[in-house]
Amino acid sequence: MTEVIGVRFKKVGKVYYFSPEGLNINKGDHVIVETARGVEYGEAVMPNRMVDDDKIVKPLRNILRIATEADKKTVEENEKKENEAFDICQKKVAEHKLDMHLVTVEYTFDRNKVLFYFTADGRVDFRELVKDLASVFRTRIELRQIGVRDEAKMIGGLGVCGKPLCCATFLDDFQPVSINMAKEQNLSLNPAKISGTCGRLMCCLKYEQEAYDDMIRTTPSVDSVVETPQGPGTVIDVSLLKGICKVRLDNSPDSPKCYGKCDCKLLKDARGKRECPKAASKTEDQEILPEDLDILTKE
C-alpha cells in the first residue's frame, strides 16, 4: 500500500496520483506539483489515502507545496497571458495561411512552455509557425492537434437535451461509441438525431448500453417461439424498455397479444435452436457474441 493524493489539472480531466510527501491535503486544496511538463498548479480531488501498489505507476512524483496566494495570482496572470497569446496565434495562423482552427492556449504554471491546441482535417506543416511564435513569446512552444470531441470538452456548450455537455462537466475520458448501440436501443439512425455538438455519436449512447445488453439477454427476440399462458406462439415485436413481447398465438394468429417477458417461456430461438444461451442462463458473466446480437436485434 502507498499513500497518495489525487490531483486534477483541468475542470474536467483525468485524476493523477502524487506522493503527499508528509503533507495533509484536503479535498479542494490547490497544490503545486512536479509533472513531466514541469511545475504545475492543480486541485486535489482526493485527499490522503492508501492505495494498492498495483493501481499506481511508480515512481510517484512529489507534491512541492500547498498553493499560496502568490501562486493563485500567478495562475490568474497566466490566464490573461493565454488570452493574449490566443489572439496573437490566430493572427499568425492567418498570415501563414494554414488550414487549422485554434481551440485554446495553455501556459504551464512556471511559464516555461506555451501549448496551442488546434483542430484540422489533416496533417498541418506548422514548423514556420512555431518559429514565428517562439520569436514572439521567447519560450518553448508546443502545437498539439486534437480531435473534435476534445474540442467540445475544452470549449463546452449545451447538448440537444438542453444541459451542459457531459464531456465538459463530468466525463474524465471518452468511451468508444458505435452505431450498433443506436440500433440496439431502437433509436433513429438519422445522424442529426444521434450526433452530439461535436458531430460524433453522442456519448450518452454508452450510458444505457449495459442495461440494453441485459434486456437483450433476458428478452425473447423477434421470430422466437415461446410458450405463453394462452398457448404457444411466435414473437412478432419486442419492447425492451417495457419488457413486453407481442406474440402471434398459434391458436389465434389474427389476434396478436402482448405479454410480459417473464410470461414467455422460450421454446425455440429465432435461429431455430431449442436452447438459447442468452435465455438459459441470465448471469452477468455470460458473454454475448456479435452474431447473437445480430439475431437479437433483428427487425
Image (cartoon, grey):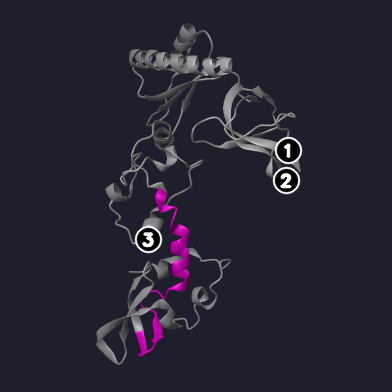
**Viewer-nearest residue: 65 or 12:** 65
Task: Give neighbour class at mark 3: few <14, some 14-19, many 20+ (Cα, 10 Å).
Answer: some
- Amino acid bearing label 1: Glu
Magenta stretch encompasses residue 157: no
Please provide the residue range marked out in magenta.
Answer: 204-233
Check the picture and name the quadrant holding the C terminus: bottom left
Instruction: Please tell me which of labels 1 and 2 falls first in the chain.
Output: 1
**Viewer-nearest residue: 31 or 296:** 31
Q: For mark 3, what is the residue? A: 185
Give how far across and how far down residue 134 sits, in percent: 49, 10
- Residue at 48% from the left image edge and 66% from the top image edge: 214
- Amino acid bearing label 3: Gln
- Residue at 44% from the left image edge and 68% from the top image edge: 216
Give how far across and how far down residue 197 sits, in percent: 33, 40
CA–CA distance in space, label 2 to label 3: 38 Å
**Which type of secondary structure does the marked residue at label 3 adopt?**
loop
Q: For mark 2, what is the residue? A: 52
Instruction: Please tell me which of labels 3 and 1 falls first in the chain.
Output: 1
